[in-house]
Structure formats: C-alpha cells, structure tokens
Amino acid sequence: MGAQLRVYKRRIRAVTATKKITKAMEMIAASRIVKAQRKVAASMPYATELTRAVTAVATGSNTKHALTTEVEAPTRAAVLLITSDRGLAGGYSSNAIKQAERLTERLRAEGKDVDAYIVGRKGVAYYGFRERKIADSWTGFTDSPAYADAKRVAAPLIEAIQTETAEGGVDELHIVYTEFVSMMTQNAVDGRMLPLSLAETSAGAQDEDRAKGEILPLFEFEPSAEDVLDALLPRYVESRIYNALLQSAASEHAARRRAMKSATDNAGDLIKSLSRLANAARQAEITQEISEIVGGASAMADATAGSDK
C-alpha cells in the first residue's frame, strides 16, 4: 500500500506542476488577445479606404489591368494558407488546414493547378510530412505579425500573378486564414484576393456612400490609371494579407487561451480524482496497520493465556 500511495502523490505533484504551466499560458494568451484585437481594429480603416481607392481607379477608367481583369480560362491559382508557429492552440491550425484542403479540391475540380504558399510552422510541417510541394513559406512571426512581414509574404504572390502562367505565374490568388469573431468564436475562412471582384466592391462602396448621403466623386488619374493601379494594388494585397495575419494572430491567442483553460480545468479534476484515490489508499493502509496491530495483540494475549495455564 505504501508504494501505491507514493505513486499517487508523485502523479499529483506532476499534474500540479502542469496545471501551473497551463494557467500561466492561459493568462499570457488572454493578455495578448487584447493587443491583437486593437491591431485588427486599427488596420481596418486603412484596408477599407485602400479597397475603395483601388475600386475607384478600376471602375473609373477603361484600363484593363492584369490584377483586376478576369482571365477567360484560368488554369493556375495560388493559395496562401496562414497557420501558427506554435501548438497548444486546440484545433486552430488544423481547422485552417482543412479549409485550405477544401479550397484546393474545389479549385482542382475547376481544372486549375494549385501552388501552395504557407505561413506558420504547423502548415509547413503538414505539407512537408505529406511530401507536397510548397511554392514558398514563412515562419517565426504568426503570434505577433508586423506590416513588414505582410510585405515579405505579398512580394512573391504579386510577382506570381503578374507573370504569365506559361512562365510559372498564376491567374488567381486565394487566401485562407482564421477570422476572429469573438473570444469564443474563430472561423477558418477563404477568399479570393486577386483578381479583384470589382462588381462586389464597387456596389458595396456605392451603397455605403448613398447611405451616408455622399456624392460619388469623379477622378482624374496622373500620369495614367494603369500607373496608379500599379502603385495601389501591391499596397492592396499587402493590406489584405496584413489584416488576415492580425486576425489569425488574435484567433490563435483566443484558441490557445481556451485550450489552456480546458487543460487547467482538466488538471484540477485529475488532481481531485488522484487525491481521492490517495486518501482511499492511505485509509486502506491505516486500516491494514490497525488490523495487524489488533491481530498481533490478540495473538500475544492468546500466547500469554496459554503460558499461564
């Protein structure tokens, strides 16, 4: 019995130490969520106005630009997948990977080849383990991305869509990331970044202007609409990727906080269960010792009585 009690006590100490670690990670993730939310909110106005500016240039001119013109028969697409660098975040990365798999299957069903661009070690490890080709990858900044990171990610994607498919370029650019809805809800989503869907963006901008009672402006472009698009659209891609990185970071912290809280609660339940087992083992040990003492005393009493006769 003594050996069993020592096993329970050793397990209780180990689980208690783990509980302290998960509790600390939960508190750290909770503190980082607020900062990530602020960054997401701060990036939204810039992304919105930049989208309006790009839409205005594209719809206010007759210029056909490679980044806004639909290809008649697209044959190749690039998919940017954003995952995490670290684990212990529940199903955060796996949900994004599953969403990317569904998007890839849909694009291939449409007859398009897919080039994978991966952000985060989890996504890189997933594709590497399955020996799948990765066009490019980036790691080391998923929990706290900066705009410079978004520029590094955007550069090869912009180059790919500006290159002819016969020379290794792509016709479409898609992105898969985790949208931060609330502290309890984060959804893995996908969307097409390029070519820009002018019908949807222009209709949304016009509806918003009409709701505000604003008059739609007329634009003149210097030196030309094409040059303006050349300057604006890279910024548009960078801002979209930056916003996706920020939302993914907030979602990662929220998922890790939830996972660590669950782990902490489970550790507490396990400690209670082990404590009950340890108490039962201790009581059984005490009962056995008492029984041995009583049995020994009874045997001694019987022996003494026999010697007196």
Image (cartoon, grey):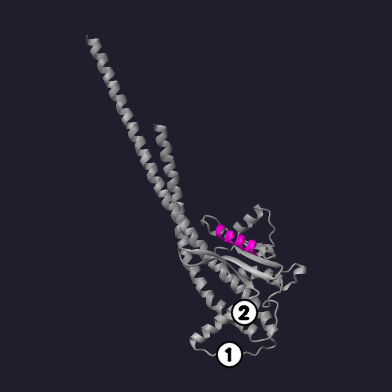
Image coords of residue 148 (percent x, y) = 61, 70
Foreground pick, 256 / 200: 200
Q: Secondary structure at mark 2?
A: helix
- 146 in magenta: no
Report the predominant secondary structure element of the magenta stretch.
Answer: helix
Inspect this view and state whether residue 107 appears.
Answer: yes
Q: Residue 212, image x and y in percent?
A: 49, 86
Vertical placement of residue 243 versus 11, above or below: below
Vertical position of residue 141 compared to residue 8: above or below: below
Mark 2 sits on what residue? 198
Which residue extends farthest right?
166
Identity of the residue drawn at 37% across and 38% down:
278
Q: Find numbered disc 1 in the image and state the secondary structure of the residue it sits on.
A: loop
Name the amino acid, label 2: Leu
Three-letter amino acid code at disc 1? Pro
Is the residue marked by circle 1 packed among few (<14), some (14-19), or many (20+) residues within 10 Å? few
> Magenta segment, which residues?
94-106
Asked where in the image residue 195 lies, by quadrant, the reply is bottom right
* Quadrant, the C terminus: top left
Residue 206 x/y as whole percent: 55, 84
User: x%, y% of residue 230?
Assistant: 68, 80
Residue 104 magenta? yes
Report crowding for label 2: few under 14, some 14 to 19, many 20 or more residues within 10 A (C-alpha).
Answer: some
Q: Is residue 196 left or right of residue 259?
A: right
Residue 225's place in the image compared with 291, above or below, is below
Q: Earlier in the sequence, mark 1 or mark 2?
A: 2
Which of 245/178 is in front? 178
According to the picture, the residue beneath numbered tag 1 turns out to be: 217
Q: Is residue 121 above or below residue 203?
A: above
Q: Nearer the viewer's eye, disc 1 or disc 2? A: 2
